[in-house]
Image (cartoon, rainbow, N blue to C red):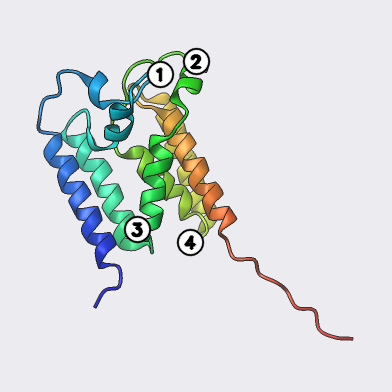
Amino acid sequence: MDTRKVEKVTALVIAAVVVCLSFFRIWDWQTVGIYAGSDMSGRLLYPFFHANAFHAALNSWCLLAMMFIYDIRIGRLLLAYAIATTIPIDTIGGLIAGMDSPTVGLSGIVFFLFGSISFEVLRKWYYQLWMIFYLTAGFLLPNTNAILHLWCYMLGFLVALLNKPIIKKSHGSK
């Protein structure tokens, strides 16, 4: 029996909810989005709402791929949610123009997970070059909160770095 059944079921439920919610028209993104000055409900709900069905499907697919391919436990998924929802948007929004419009999407959680597997992938440099490409593309594409992606990726990378096993080299006796 699969030992990660809870994690996989959780990811499937999240993906299903996200895709289903994408078919409902949201009239006021201020209530479900995160932005400088947003209230707690927007902060907690923004990962589950998406601008359209394609956005929801892409983010859901990335989440499912991460959860089914890598050994991501429920604790890491909850940490990803906590990191994504606690981005200091008010501080960043004060420094960067355009952060006052609402952001929605699961990508903050996904980018944290991308960062958190940095030392688990086989081709580490290749992986990091692709991540640099994706993060850079986010800064070039309109209506993409690249700062959120970068924040979550860097914190995921930091968590991976802090949890990386230390390999102690033994020196033979003389």
Residue at the spot 31% in from the left edge and 57% down from the top edge: 67
The residue beneath circle 4 is 120
Q: Which mark is residue 94?
A: 2
Q: Quadrant of the C terminus?
A: bottom right
Q: Quadrant of the N terminus?
A: bottom left
Q: CA distance from mark 1 to mark 3?
A: 29 Å
| Residue 162 x, y percent position in the rendering | 59, 54
Q: CA distance from mark 1 to mark 2?
A: 8 Å
Where disc 4 sits, the SS reads loop
Q: CA distance from mark 2 to mark 3?
A: 33 Å
Label 1 with label 3: CB-CB less than 8 Å = no
Amino acid type for the residue under numbered disc 3: Ile
Position of 16 relative to 98 (above/below):
below
Q: Earlier in the sequence, mark 1 or mark 3?
A: 1
Amino acid type for the residue under numbered disc 2: Gly
Q: Residues within 10 Å of mark 4 (few under 14, many from 20)?
A: few
Q: Which mark is residue 74?
A: 3
Q: Residue furthest bottom?
A: 174
The residue beneath circle 1 is 36
Amino acid type for the residue under numbered disc 1: Ala
Residue at the spot 31% in from the left edge and 21% down from the top edge: 102
